[in-house]
Amino acid sequence: MTTRVYPAYIGGRDVTSESGHRVHTVTTRAIIEDTFPSLRLKRDLDLGKADASAAGDVVAGACELADDAMVQQSLEAAAAAAPVWARVPLAERLEIGRQIARRLLAHREPLVDLLVAEGQPRSVAEGMITGLPETGWSAETLQWCAEQMAISRHDGVREMTLRRVPDGVVCLNPPQNAATVNALNGLTALLSGNTLVVRAPRGVPLSCMYAMREVVAPVLEDAGAPAGTLNALCGAPMLDAWLASEHVNDVIYFGGSSMGLRFEQDCVAARKKPILELAGNDACVVWRDADLDDAVQSLTQFFMNSGQICNVPNQVIAHPAIADELIERLVAAMSGIRPGFPDEPGVVLTPVLGADWFYGCLAEALARGARLVHGGRRLEVDGRPSDTGFFLEPTVVRVDGLHGARNLSVVRDETFFPLLPIVVPQAGGSDDALFDEVLAFVNANAYGLRNSLWTSDPDTIERYLDTVTNGGNLKVNDSHSGFLPFLPNQGGTGLTGGAFGEASHPMLRTTHLQAVSVIRPGGPR
């Protein structure tokens, strides 16, 4: 693997700090194989006490750390470029978007390699990078968003237009667990005429900076976009500087719900638009007439990245008539889900640092009547049970009864580990009444990212769609976690998106609606 070093990219040029401090990426394989020496090496590299060129293939690259002056410089560059970039015709910006999508595929292999070095399983990384040009950056998605940018009518006298105007400078704070893919999703805000400042998280900055510097920036430069249209830098959290800046209009924020909702209040107080991508605690309903093979295939998506992804089915509500069979099939399917190094084919599990949280939730659930169906152990990278392994065995618990299920943290809260609760409503009474209870349970979820349903009955589908208002995405007999073109793949209600939460196309969420009425001089009156 080529060792790469990325300075900040500000105002169309590479910028370094006076300190010259860098954050180095030591490969996840090296850390799993030989943990403490690898972490010591990273520390010494970051402190400037070791030479990266002498470290060999265990070092994938480094990113310059931005200082406060560079943060301010990036905001000033974005503000200077904003009015010029907003005047670029929409058709030209769309063509730039199509070129970015094509270039992303052309750079797929090195980008996936960097994601793997940072700990993303290769199978997951390949799906993410290959999928982006077919979903959020697809021609279909971009064209639909473009059609919403201006809609005109005439009444014989005047031209009336409802148009979406770019907000201006958008700052993007992607999450550490999926920084690059979420940064790329958020970058569609460029196409509606905004300029961007992207912070690459210090924990996994390399793939994010590669995507900005090697994929996006060259397209903008070749198209003649004003310097400062895109700015990307790695550094400490910049939220306070963004809120204090006169230049910032919007902040796209990824993070946990408690901190995110506090940040939403701070944003509003600072007169900035908060666009929140917080937590998920998605519900998947499997009804008695569901195709269980397809449902199980969707449920196994929960274990991608060991459950450390927001848009996976965190809780299952299974009809009592099929619950036993569903659980049996799910456990059988889980036998093929194993730990491994991220560069190995077929691996989807990743190390889990929150093992204490996992065991606390599991113990609470079992103490309150849940039943352990499968899993519950630490594992070494080769799958051996261990008291000290980095990996957690995929785990399923059964919770009988809807009433009181949300008293359990594993059902009530977003979890970030591979512990899946299957809630089985109490049998008895009519299916219609039972379905009403299930729908109420889904709508009462404090989170609202995605929900899904598996059934073969058209009437059940319509009742579900008519009743469930919770969630930015509803999936019926379709992959719970899969991304699609045209439909927004992010955003949600409640603890997922805050007070202004909804399904989110960043290209549209970073604009505001403006009404225009024009009577042309010399026209009919």
Image (spheres, helix red, strand yellow):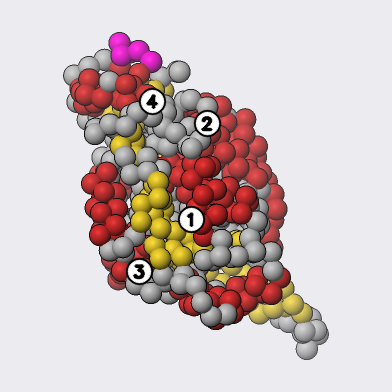
Q: Nearer the viewer, mark 4 or mark 2?
A: 4
Please, what secondary structure does the residue beneath circle 4 have?
loop
Residue at (56, 44) in percent of width and height: 225
Q: Quadrant of the N terminus?
A: top left
Q: Residues within 10 Å of mark 1 (few under 14, many from 20)?
A: many
Report the predominant secondary structure element of the magenta stretch: helix
Tag of residue 313? 1
Tag of residue 335? none
What amino acid does circle 4 point to?
A: Asp
Please, what secondary structure does the residue beneath circle 3 have?
helix
What amino acid does circle 2 point to?
A: Gly
Is residue 152 placed above or below 329 in the rendered structure?
A: below
Q: Residues within 10 Å of mark 3 (few under 14, many from 20)?
A: some
Residue at (62, 70) in percent of width and height: 163
Please, what secondary structure does the residue beneath circle 2 have?
loop
Circles 3 and 4, Cβ within 8 Å, touching? The answer is no
Q: Which residues are magenta?
A: 53-57
Residue at (46, 72) in percent of width and height: 426
